[in-house]
Amino acid sequence: MIDQSKSIQAKLPKNAWLIVFLLFWVGALNYLDRNTIATMRSSIIESIPMTDAQFGILTSVFLWTYAFFSPVAGFIADRFSRSKVIIFSFFIWSLVTWLTSYASTYNQLLATRALMGISEAFYLPAAGALIIDYHRNSTQSIATSIHLTGVTLGSTLGFIGGWLAEKHTWHYAFHVFGILGLVYAIILLFLLKDIPKNSSESNNKNESQEKETNGNVNFGLAVVDLFKNRSFIYLFLFWGILGIVGWTIMAWLPTFFKEQFNLSQSMAGFYATAFLYPASIVGLLFAGILSDRWSKRNKYARIFVPILGLLIAAPCIFFASYTSILYISIVLFMLYGLTRSSVEANFTPIACSIVSLRYRSTGLGILNMIATTVGGFGIYLTGMFRDLEISLKIIYQMVALSIIICVFLLWLIKREQSKKKV
């Protein structure tokens, strides 16, 4: 078994781990730029007066534009260079982040959030597929997990936005983050590359043939092919429901801590990110390693690990929102982050295992679309519920119950895959 593992590792294309390292930091800046607005809520509202529902729309419009363009963005990554799509996306969203620092009205702020949604839509489908292009068999879950620790790190550092907003202004925070991204995007022009055509990955004749047909397919055929797959439909529903759960918790958690425990904006942002996201990083790495190792003995390991994780995550969210003791709530949210990460560690490998190779990025784009679309509505509806004086405590408890439905959908995917193997 050890020799086989070493053989698989030796077949990894050149720079396979460099690609993961480079995308780690792109992912970090991706989520730092998109999520930091939640930790600056009070400062932004003081500068540009708005209701909670209007503030919710700022994130929702990002998600809706992100969702609308995700399928096409994924298809473009399937048809053209994935690395170039990533760099272009990164440069544009960093430019938009910098431009956000000059917004002085609600409509201007709304416009920049929409532009950021469009530009960021091109990143994850291409990045996820590029990592799987480089990593196969025993490294795909851990490679995906390492990339997503960068995403989680970006969310963890979101409290810096709230801190900069208090020390300087919220405009200053966007200015700094935008410039940082623009510089790194230029560096990537020289380092980030697609997988070489003569790599060991191409030894599989069936996969090589699928790649050669990429230019002969169109977006409509890709969508039809994907939705003929019952497993993809279940995954589509699963990711949509989990999108409501994840985005609602993430977008409103700083506000929850601020109001539930009477904290300042900076401290609420700190507790909402500095504990939850490091736990998520640990969970990602642990789940990635566990899934890769277990998959050598059980071909459904990458489905079983998320099922077990979500069965722990659901009660954690329910009781974290119920308690009136700050430190118990923090610990429970940490456990949620730790166990929920088992989904992220395995989601891209699961999706790529049930989707045709030539539609890989397109499939990931469609899945991003459903998660962000319903996630955007969830965030907006949460703002509406708050305007109706329904507490985040009640909303979080309802969201926790939705996780059980996700567990059932994962089980259905496993059942469908079992039928195909017979």
Image (cartoon, grey):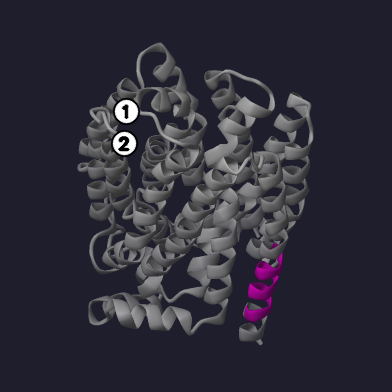
**Residue furthest front in the image:** 388
Return the x and y of residue 381 as percentages of the image width and height: 54, 51
Numbered-mark total? 2
Name the quarter where the N terminus is drawn. Answer: bottom right
Q: Residue at x 39, y 42 (%)?
A: 58
Q: Is residue 152 above or below residue 212?
A: above
Name the quarter where the C terminus is drawn. Answer: bottom right
Q: Is residue 27 left or right of residue 244?
A: left
Q: Using the image, tell me which numbered label, if any, was put on residue 174.
A: 1
Residue segment shown in magenta: 407-416
Q: Is residue 93 above or below residue 70?
A: above
**Residue furthest bottom in the image:** 422
Q: Secondary structure at mark 1?
A: helix
Q: Is residue 299 visible?
A: no
Q: Quadrant of residue 244?
A: bottom right
Q: Using the image, tell me which numbered label, if any, was put on residue 106.
A: 2
Q: Is residue 383 above or below residue 422?
A: above
Return the x and y of residue 359 as percentages of the image width and height: 37, 73
> What amino acid does circle 1 point to?
Phe
Few, some or many residues within 10 Å of mark 1 (<14, 14–19, 20+): many
Q: Is residue 378 left or right of residue 395?
A: left
Q: Quadrant of residue 278?
A: top right
Q: Quadrant of residue 343?
A: bottom right
Closer to the camera in the image, 324 or 150: 324
Alpha-carbon span between mark 1 and mark 2: 16 Å
Return the x and y of residue 30 as percentages of the image width and height: 38, 41
Few, some or many residues within 10 Å of mark 2 (<14, 14–19, 20+): some
The secondary structure making up most of the magenta span is: helix
> What amino acid does circle 2 point to?
Tyr
